[in-house]
Amino acid sequence: MIMFKLICIGCKSEYSLNEIIYNCRKCNDLLEVQIDLEEVKDLINRRDLSLKPLSVWKYSELIPIFDKNRIVTINEGGTKLHKCSNLAEELGIKKLYVKNEGENPTGSFKDRGMTVGVTKAREFDSKKVACASTGNTAASLSAYAAKAGLKSIILIPHGAVAIGKLAQSIIYGAKVIAIKGNFDKALSIIIEASKSLGLYLLNSINPFRIEGQKTAAFEVCEQLDWHAPDRLIIPVGNAANIAAYWKGFKEFYELGFIENLPTMIGIQACGASPIVQAIKEKRDFIKPVDNPNTVATAIRIGNPASWKKAINAIKESKGTAESVTDEEILSAQRLLARKEGLFVEPASASSIAGLKKLIELGSIDKDEEIVCVATGHGLKDPDSAIKFYQEPIVIEPNFEILKEVIKG
Ligand SMILES: Cc1ncc(COP(=O)(O)O)c(C=O)c1O
């Protein structure tokens, strides 16, 4: 029996996995699952893992659930690590990969966390699950709740969620409520609602979400033939995913499955970059941004709930954080699509934009092995692709005109 417990990342108080708790009762800091890795060492090894196809649940010994028969899954994980030689050549580096998380069932990395989070909801016998969302968490939670037969309640910032994501939550049957306010406000209200109305909260302050999301780091190591890249570049919004990857890399390292750790590079949009500002000003705390703004709606977050975990991951890994403009994000989105055939949503393209910026700043060695995480599929936000690029050319149905247009 593997030993799991919840630990406060601030005062280190311990909690059992049997209670529903999101923050430390003593100091209100975030919680994290801690695993007795010595016990795990007796149960899994590299050779056995290599024989199984990639998926979140192939790492079940490292995921704190009690009953494997009650797992809520839509076959998440197992996303491709694309070798991007065309883009690498364009940027003047040698080894570039994109972990394309848009290949998950609802089109984003959130599914890795939701398969675990909704399984926990089932274990806790919760009937209603809830989240605040910039769109992808909502889409994912709605799908997994549907699969589990649970009711889902979604709070979104009105008018600020990409149309594809909204469509997903609606079709999966969630109760979608739009507030006249931003994501940060939505999160604070849903936390309050979850406490007083008994809703099981599935935002990423729920530590079980991280346990699913960390499996992306395990996959990257396997896909690179059992090592970590030199650098992992990842978009940062509410700031849990960067911490999840770092936890995954550290667990594989402590298990002896890899012999190196990557430096973690967090990328935020200029209009929503409290973590970048904290890192650049060498602060251990963030100053929330009041009116966050960026075309990358998924990371339009001014007061990231998991900022402390993100700053820890960046510091421990000797990494850094960088911000990119909307123009740089859209240009990177286009570049990735046109060089590699990968269509990712604007927030996802921020990792490519960040890579480009760091190369231009001379902070990246050309020989480094780099993995950029593309967090969500481009079709989730078709409006921005059409609006910011090129409308179709409309012509009369006439061959001569067509010929001229093609030549032109
Ligand atoms: C596509 C996409 N990228 C990045 C992020 C940021 O992830 P995190 O909030 O864990 O930092 C999100 C979060 O909603 C997202 O939807």
Image (cartoon, helix red, strand yellow):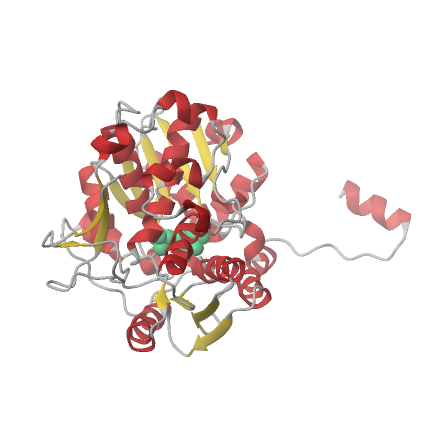
Query: Is 250 above or below relative to 390?
Result: above
Q: Is residue 30 left or right of residue 123?
A: left
- The residue nearer to you, when weighing 46 against 338, is 46
Q: Is residue 403 left or right of residue 164?
A: right
Query: Is 118 above or below relative to 128?
Result: above
- Quarter of the image for residue 42 reads top left
State the residue at coordinates (43%, 29%): 96
x and y, in percent, of residue 260 in the image: 26, 25
- The residue nearer to you, when weighing 175 against 278, is 175
x and y, in percent, of residue 124 in the image: 35, 61
x and y, in percent, of residue 282 in the image: 14, 48
State the residue at coordinates (29%, 34%): 249
Query: Is 313 above or below relative to 95?
Result: below
x and y, in percent, of residue 315 in the image: 18, 41
Q: Tell me the quarter of the image containing the N terminus.
A: top left
Q: Is residue 195 left or right of residue 151?
A: left
